[in-house]
Amino acid sequence: MTSDQGIQFTPEGKLKHFLTIEGLSKSLLTEILEVAESFASVSEQQVKKFPLLRGKTIINLFFENSTRTRTTFDLAATRLSADVLNMDISTSATSKGETLLDTIHNLEAMHIDMFVVRHAVSGAAHFIAQHVAPNISVINAGDGQHAHPTQAMLDMFTIRRFKKDFSQLKVAIVGDILHSRVARSQIQALNILGVLAVHVIAPKTLLPAQAESLGVKVFYDMKQGLEGVDVIIMLRLQKERMTGALLPTESEYYKCYGLTEEKLEFAKQDAIVMHPGPINRGVEIASEVADGMKSVILKQVSYGIAVRMAIMSMTMQATGNRE
Amino acid sequence: MTRIHISQGRIIDPENGTDSIGDIYIADNRIFSTMGQSDSFDADITIDARNQIVCPGFIDLSVRLREPGATQKATIASEVKAAAASGVTALCLPPDTSPCIDNPAVVELIEDKAKVADYRQIYPIGALTYKLQGQELSSMFALKNAGCIAVSNAQMPIANLLILRRAMEYAASFDLLLIYRPQDYYLSQQGCAHEGMVATRYGLPAIPDIAETTALLQCLELVAHTGCRVHFGQISCAKSIDYIRQAKDSGLPVSADVAIHQLHLTEHDVLPFDGVYHVNPPFRREADRQALRKAINEGVLDAICSDHQPHNIDAKLGAFPETEPGISSLETLLPLTLSLIDENKLDLMQAIAVLTTNPAKILGLEAPGLAVGKFADLCIFDPEMTWQINPETWLSSGRNTPYWQQNLRGKVTHTIQNGRLIFGQGDFF
């Protein structure tokens, strides 16, 4: 495939948009993690504001609801001293016949510096990045089933905090891979960072065609798939999957693929359990596991702010002096 | 009527296997003579066809004109110009206009528009079911009498096999040809890309090849049962070709075509999220592309069509799954077909046959040809002329082509329809 991942960079090679993990280098991902580390270590002592984005205006443009992701972007921007506007467009403009592009151009006219975009259709963030004015950065906060790169980076950050060396790790991702933009971005990031193996575990109905081509080993069975893994990432099971003949019942799914303490035994003793949230207790994960010693789910949420601060400040540096 | 003398062209006529340099004289809509130097012939127009190929006019099995109903995309007037300049002298119009072609009044409306645009051979395809809804049969007999050359449900699904069976039985009663796009409704729902590596990587809703093959197999069973003649339009999968070959070998009355771009592009050519590559059926694997090319060469696929689908800019502006499928492809039909010769997939005689005599046979039209007495539908093209696909010279209102700025070889110089020069050296008549 001819790749246009070049769209993410300025002609000088600096990160300008953050749309997908695909095509990014190991050194860039590591740099993001290190910048995030510097924000995180300061923030862990006291909540502190940085003046890096003072005078900049950021719009959280959410065509699909998500309170949590939006809140962490909002907090990240505020801690970088930017002005933030939240717009939920899922029910307003575009459904009245205004096109995505009209919406973008209208907002552009208000001298915006960055769009944080979430949209239900794969490719929406790319499309916006292709059409915005050159001084605007676009950050993908999740597009359809394609990518959720900031989530993947905060997951990498979490793994690095607990496991240090990626090259020795086996990571299992469990659940609805087919519809998951989170899984796609995680798999790309894990492979770029050079983990030993990525296992995906799901029934065939929740796996995409030629899943192996993503660079993973496919398992239909939890015992085999979790054998010896260091990190377990559980994916959220959307309720609507039950109606689409993809799965029979929640309880059968829980029996086969829900992470219980018994199944957790298959993994390494020091394995960590992650979940992008919000979790369905008793569907994909047992409460004892979600709240247990091995769970780092709440850590993920707090690291999310530092990682998003890192990505926002890095992309704004690329566009900052181009007006 | 104009009397036309075509001088010293390389005459290629698949009907009788002719390939020789010679002259053609046209009078009273028909080919009057092919003998050298007819001094008594007083020509109104003489065309110097040296170093050019003279062949029957192209018959395109699927051309969307967007009229009636979607004139923001294109009009009959705009698209017949693109057809004329591309050597197309007859074209089939699928029934998914708005209103759709499910009653004789719409057929008349199209005829009137074609008359105004001065283009003779637009063959409307009647709707197989009322409003293309796949629920009730259309008045096929009335549609046939009004001038519909075949019936089809275009891209609209017939989810209920009983309805398809009844429709085929009814069509067979009047010896109507069914043009069928095999694609299972449920297996392809909301899909926009081939179910494979690329759709998996980009998280695009997918159309698996079983959406085509299962629908094809079901229809073949119904052909055997009902005796309905069926032409399968825009085949995209290697496996489909095996099934069509078997059906033909067992004597079923079936034929099939492929859209020209399917012979050139694959899922890997689909730049990430560039809506211009959004087509239906989707671009598939390299193995499919190779199998489709081989099938054209071996005659399992009978014809190449443009599957011309002009769109306005807005239709392609959006995130990939939200764009409308289709390519504006009339003007690239000839050069992209000729390039298969360069790649040794086809010889020139075959390339012309799949654009002329074969589609005529499928539609049950009088065999086109360049012999004396034949209808004078002709195309003259320069096989060596290289030209750039650019917006300044593009004729279709649909600007949705993936070939901008590319240099393609082979250009139509003259088109004669019904004995009349309708396009010559860049001008329309």
Image (cartoon, rainbow, N blue to C red):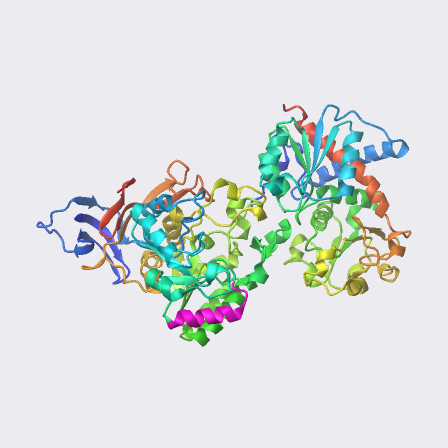
Chain part drawn in magenta? B158-173
Farthest-out residue, front: B105
Quadrant of the image occupied by residue A11: top right
In this rendered view, identify the residue nearer to me: B30 or B404: B30
* Rendered location of residue B133, percent (x, y): 51, 60
Q: How many marks?
A: 0
Residue at the image point whose x is 82% and y is 53% from the top: A230
Q: Quadrant of the C terminus of chain B?
A: top left
* Rendered location of residue B83, percent (x, y): 35, 48
* Rendered location of residue B163, percent (x, y): 50, 69
Residue at the image point whose x is 60% and y is 39% from the top: A100
For the question of whether residue B30 can be seen, the reply is yes
Question: Residue B79: within the magenta?
Answer: no
Q: Most prominent secondary structure in the magenta stretch? A: helix
Is residue B382 found left or right of B319 in the rendered image?
left
In the depicted structure, whether residue B358 falls above or below residue A23: below
In the depicted structure, whether residue B86 falls above or below residue A73: below
Farthest-out residue, left: B40
In this rendered view, identify the residue nearer to me: B163 or B198: B163
In this rendered view, identify the residue nearer to me: A149 or B373: B373
For the question of whether residue B382 can be seen, the reply is no
Is residue A123 found left or right of A284 in the rendered image?
left
Question: Residue B164: within the magenta?
Answer: yes
In the depicted structure, whether residue A97 falls above or below residue B307: above
* Rendered location of residue B80, percent (x, y): 34, 47
Residue at the image point whose x is 9% and y is 49% from the top: B39
